[in-house]
Structures are given as C-alpha cells and as structure tokens.
Amino acid sequence: MMKTLAVLAVLAATCAAFGDGGPTPEMLEASGLSGEAPRCDAPQPEMVSDRGLTLLIPDSEADVIAMFNPEDGTYEGIFVENDTTGTQYDFATPVNAVQGPDGNVYVSDQLSDIVYVFDGYGEFLWVGAETGLNNVRGIDFRNDTLFVTSGDDYVAMFSGPDEFAGYFIQDGSDPFDIHFLDDGTCLLANIQGSSDDIRHYEADGQSYTSLFSVSFPEQIQADAENPDHYLNAAFSADQITEFMLDGTIVDTWNLDGGRGIYRLGNGNLLATNGEGVHEIDPATGSIIETEYEGQGRFIELADLPVVATEGPGGAPLPSAGLSLRPNPFRSTLSVEVSVPSACRTEVMVYSLGGRLVRNLFTGTMDAGSHVTVWDGRGDSGQMMESGTYLVRVVAGSADSVAKVNLLR
C-alpha cells in the first residue's frame, strides 16, 4: 500500500510539472512511469526452467524478473520475485537485468534509483549502485566496472558495491541504454529530445559519432545471428532497427512502443513493449506469438546455475561434473566431464526439442576429468544452425544436462 501511494504521489508531481496538458507517453517512459494501472496477476510458469542459458526480462508492472528460452522465446518462469516487505530490496520499475563478470545478476530500477545484485539463484546479495543516482535505466559492464545510465544526463561508473568511480559520459545527452563493444567503445541510446539518436562513443567516453536518428531509442543489443550487426528498439518511433557501426540501416520492423530487443536462436526477434514480450517474424514483421503479458523491459542473456532435479521420493539425482567452454561458442566447444570413478559414460548433444544431434562419446571413462570437443556439426556431418542446444552426460547412474548457445 505504501509503495502504491508513493508511486501515485510521484505521478501527481509529474503531472503538475508537465502542466495542465498532462504528461505525454514519452515523458512517462523517461521518468519510469507507464501511466497504466498496476496489475497484481503476474503470469504463472507453465514449467520450471532447468536454467543454464536463459533470457532475463524485467516486468515493471508485476515487479519481477522473468526467464525466457533463448531459442524460441518461451516463458520459463520467474527468476526474482519482488520483496514485498521491502526489507532487502524493493522493485518499483525494474528495467535491465544484466549478468556481471562475477556471475551475479545486476538489476537496475528506475524509480528506486538503485542497482540491486542477486546471485545465480535469484537470492539478494547487496546494493551494487545507489550513491548519486536518479532515474536509472540501462546498465552494462566493461571489465569489472559497472556503467549506469541516468535521466539526469550522465553515465556513472561504479568500481565495486556502491563504489562511485566518476562519470563516463556527461555531455548533455540523455542516455537510456549503453552497450559496450569488445574494443572498449560503446553504443549509446540518446533521448535528449532535439537530438534523439544512436551514438558510438570512443573508449574514453569523450568523443562520439552519431550513427542515425530515431525517436526515443531504448535498448541496444548485439545481433546474435549476424556478427557486427546491432539491434535497437525505439519507443516513440514504434520501430526496431538493425544497423551496423558505420550507420548503415540493414532493416527495420514496426513495433508499438518498443523497449527491449533480442535475436532468438531460431532467427526470430524477441521484443518487448508495454503489452508484453513478443516473438516477431523478421521476414514479415508480424507478431508470431505473445509469450508473456506485462510491462516488458530490456532483454539480456544470462548463464544461470542449473537447478537440481528431483528423483523418486524427492531425492536429488546424482550428477556428473560438466563444464562447457566457451559458452556461447562459434567454432568449437570444449566439454569437460568429471567422474568420481571408472564408469560407462555417454556425452550427447540434443536439440531443445529432444532430438539427438550428435553423440560425442560412448565408452568407459576412468576417474578424473576428460575433455571432448564439439565442432558444431551433427552426426551426419552437417553444420548445425545457430541456436541453443542441450549437452547431456550420463555417467553410471549420474545424469547432467547443460545448455549451450551456438552462434554463426
């Protein structure tokens, strides 16, 4: 009740500030207020995710972080519920959930003005950033430094838990998202008003190139299917844009009030807006299916710990040690299997639909660690398509499964 009153108070103040005409949708979006009545019926999961590679999407209406399948966008359940007591954390408008280099998940909240930190199982750890922040939006990491965009026209840096390390960008732009590239430069979504655009900043955060203009750009994401291509969802332009670093616009699609964007393993687009999370056919631009109804925000890939399944009577199934590197991968995947004693072992790759793709090993493994390699080909020798696959190890009575993402 107190949170609802607080939000209504902010909304009233916002309306007063914007005059008798009331706030525009853009004003509400920039401030983190959707202008829609809160809803308490968060969707319930139809299945429990076995985790591994998962897409994390905040729902700022139900105040939860939801999980989705990176291959086809299927809703897989809730990663973090809100702390309704407010004793540890208090979601008001969660926007971006990013897995940091430490494996923890950092969640920016636009109205709480905080970045919260959770472990891979969704348990709250600590406040990652709060000092000096207001109206926070998209976040990203470069090495171990956390970068936070703010409606107060800056990108702040944090070198540790709430350890403010200065400003990376403070040049009059109004940043809504930041996305770092491998070379240390970054892409920025600027919603300044008179100069809304996508910018490419140098590694020092000082100089930039405006790539193209688009009204109220929100999330910027790498296109997992097309190297050196990037995606942006724009709220006011009602548009998704695929572009390159030289400013070339490769393709555009219509989406009302776009916020988050991601290229799924099946080649389709997963996009969010105030109505939910939608799978879009890039050939036609039409919505194939709405995977989830709610206030969808930014979309990020995370590699979460696999939750142990239960055997008969609720006893946890024994598992064999299984490590996949790198994940995602493009050319070769190293599958490291650890067994405590000599036993018959099988290492297999399956599609998400359960079809056997490749038998990597069948035979006896001695006690210890063993590495086998998957080159991304199926048993027939054909190169498999980009997407998410399951690597399964059966060692004696132990059974382990992990997800891996193949990029082409």
Image (cartoon, helix red, strand yellow):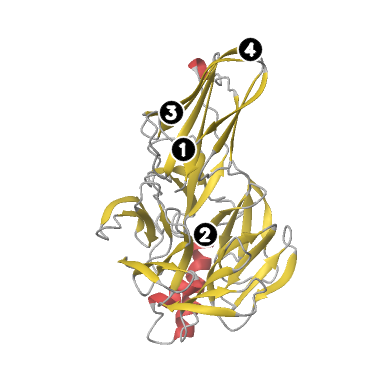
Whether residue 87 appears in this view of the structure is no
Q: Nearer the viewer, residue 40 or 247?
A: 247
* Residue found at x 62% / y 66%: 148
Closer to the camera: disc 4 or disc 1?
A: 1
Closer to the camera: disc 4 or disc 3?
A: 3
To which residue does mark 2 refer?
A: 94
Q: Residues within 10 Å of mark 3 (few under 14, many from 20)?
A: some
Q: Earlier in the sequence, mark 4 or mark 1?
A: 4
To which residue does mark 3 refer?
A: 358
Describe the element under mark 3 as helix, strand or loop. strand
Say which amino acid is labelled 1: Gly
To which residue does mark 4 refer?
A: 342
Q: Nearer the viewer, residue 79 or 18?
A: 79
Closer to the camera: disc 1 or disc 2?
A: 1
Q: Position of residue 126 (x, y in %)?
A: 69, 52
Say which amino acid is labelled 4: Ala
**Residue 326 in the image: above or below residue 213:** above
* Residue found at x 61% / y 72%: 134
To which residue does mark 1 refer?
A: 376
Whether residue 140 appears in this view of the structure is yes
Real-space Cα distance between discs 4 and 1? 28 Å
Say which amino acid is labelled 3: Arg
Q: Earlier in the sequence, mark 4 or mark 3?
A: 4
